[in-house]
C-alpha cells in the first residue's frame, strides 16, 4: 500500500519512520512519500494562501499549488482531505481505507482549501473529506498521521498477534473491557478474582459485561437502537 502526503509541513511526518508505521515500511508492507506543497508554488514568497472571497476571518489555501501537487501524485488514488467539516473517521472507515492500494492525504491549513480543489481531485480519483473528531486542529497533519496509524495496523501481516485486532475497542461495536497484568496484587489493589479463575466461560462473560457497562456509561451513542445489551442485567458487575 502506498501513502502520499501533501503538506506545507513535511517535517510533521518524521514520526512515520518510527514506531509501528516505520516497522510496516521496513517490512515492505507500505511506502510513505511526503510532498511539500510549496514545491508547487511559482512566486518568490512561495505563497499557498490568500484571503477568502466573501470576506471573513483567516486565510484560504490557493487552488493552483494544490491542483499541481495532486496532478503529480493522486491519479487513480483515494484522496483524503483532512478537515473538521468532513465525515467522522471511524474504525469502519479505517477498515475500508485499508483495502485501498493508494491513499493521498491532503493536509489543509488555515481556514481550509479552496473547494474547487476537492472538485478537481474527484476527476483524478476518489475523494473522501474526513474529520478526526468534533474539535479543530491547527491543520490536517496530525489527523493524517492518526489515519495512517489506524489504517496501517489493519494491513494483513502487520500485527504480530491478529487476535488483538479482534478484541480491541470498536472491533465489535463496544469499548474494550479493562485489562490487567502481573502482579495480581499491587499497592493493595487486586486483579478481579474471575480473571485468576481459569474459567474461560466466566472470564468471557465478565469481559462482555464490562465492555457493555463501559459503553453504556461512556459511549451510549455506540449502542444499537434496539438495546441489545444483555449480559449486564445478568451479572453483578457494578
Ligand atoms: N484539520 C483541522 N481540524 C481537523 C479535524 N478535526 N479533523 C481533521 N482535520 C482537521
Image (cartoon, rainbow, N blue to C red):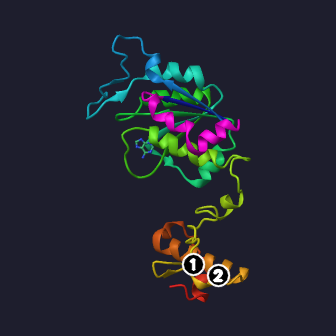
Name the residue tied to disc 2.
196
Q: Main secondary structure of the magenta part?
A: helix
Q: Earlier in the sequence, mark 2 or mark 1?
A: 1
Give whichever of 114, 91 is nearer the camera: 91
**Label 2 neighbour load within 10 Å: few <14, some 14-19, many 20+:** few
Horizontal and vertical percent position of residue 220: 49, 70
> In the image, which residues are magenta?
7-29
Identify which residue is drawn at 45% across, 30% down: 11
Which tag is nearer the camera, tag 2 or tag 1? 1
Identify which residue is drawn at 42% across, 15% down: 41
| Residue 26 covered by magenta stretch | yes
Asked whether the viewer can see residue 64, the reply is no
In the picture, residue 17 is in which quadrant? top right
Helix, strand or loop for disc 1: loop
Q: Is residue 23 left or right of residue 200?
A: left
Q: How many numbered marks have been drawn onto this rendered protein structure?
A: 2
Q: Is residue 160 left or right of residue 184?
A: right
The answer to whether residue 213 is above or below residue 103 is below
- Residue 184's tag is 1
Give whichever of 232, 124 is nearer the camera: 232
Horizontal and vertical percent position of residue 51: 29, 26
**Label 1 neighbour load within 10 Å: few <14, some 14-19, many 20+:** some
Identify which residue is drawn at 59% across, 87% down: 235
| Residue 17 covered by magenta stretch | yes
Circles 2 and 1: CB distance less than 8 Å? yes
Horizontal and vertical percent position of residue 52: 31, 28
Give whichever of 125, 182 is nearer the camera: 182
Give whichever of 142, 116 is nearer the camera: 142
Identify which residue is drawn at 51% across, 38% down: 15
Ligand 1 lies in quarter: top left
Please identify the quadrant where the N terminus is shown.
Answer: top right
Amino acid at each position: 500500500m502506498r501513502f502520499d502526503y501533501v503538506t506545507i509541513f513535511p517535517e510533521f511526518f518524521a514520526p512515520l519512520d518510527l514506531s509501528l508505521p516505520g516497522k510496516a515500511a521496513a517490512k515492505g508492507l507500505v511506502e510513505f512519500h511526503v510532498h511539500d506543497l510549496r514545491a508547487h508554488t511559482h512566486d518568490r514568497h512561495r505563497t499557498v494562501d490568500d484571503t477568502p472571497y466573501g470576506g471573513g476571518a483567516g486565510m484560504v489555501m490557493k487552488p493552483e499549488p494544490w491542483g499541481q501537487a495532486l496532478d503529480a501524485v493522486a491519479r487513480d488514488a483515494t484522496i483524503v482531505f483532512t478537515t473538521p467539516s468532513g465525515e467522522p473517521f471511524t474504525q469502519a472507515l479505517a477498515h475500508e481505507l485499508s483495502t485501498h492500494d493508494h491513499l493521498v492525504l491532503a493536509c489543509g491549513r488555515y481556514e481550509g482549501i479552496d473547494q474547487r480543489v476537492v472538485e478537481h481531485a474527484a476527476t483524478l480519483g476518489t475523494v473522501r473529506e474526513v474529520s478526526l473528531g468534533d474539535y479543530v486542529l491547527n491543520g490536517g497533519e496530525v489527523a493524517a498521521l492518526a489515519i495512517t496509524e489506524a489504517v496501517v495496523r489493519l494491513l494483513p501481516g502487520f500485527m504480530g498477534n491478529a487476535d488483538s485486532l479482534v478484541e480491541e475497542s470498536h472491533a465489535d461495536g463496544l469499548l474494550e473491557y479493562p485489562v490487567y497484568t502481573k502482579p495480581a496484587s499491587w499497592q493493595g489493589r487486586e486483579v478481579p478474582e474471575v480473571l485468576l479463575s481459569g474459567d474461560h466461560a466466566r472470564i468471557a462473560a465478565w469481559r462482555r459485561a464490562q465492555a457493555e457497562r463501559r459503553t453504556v456509561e461512556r459511549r451510549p451513542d455506540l449502542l444499537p437502537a434496539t438495546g441489545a445489551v444483555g449480559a449486564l442485567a445478568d451479572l453483578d458487575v457494578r
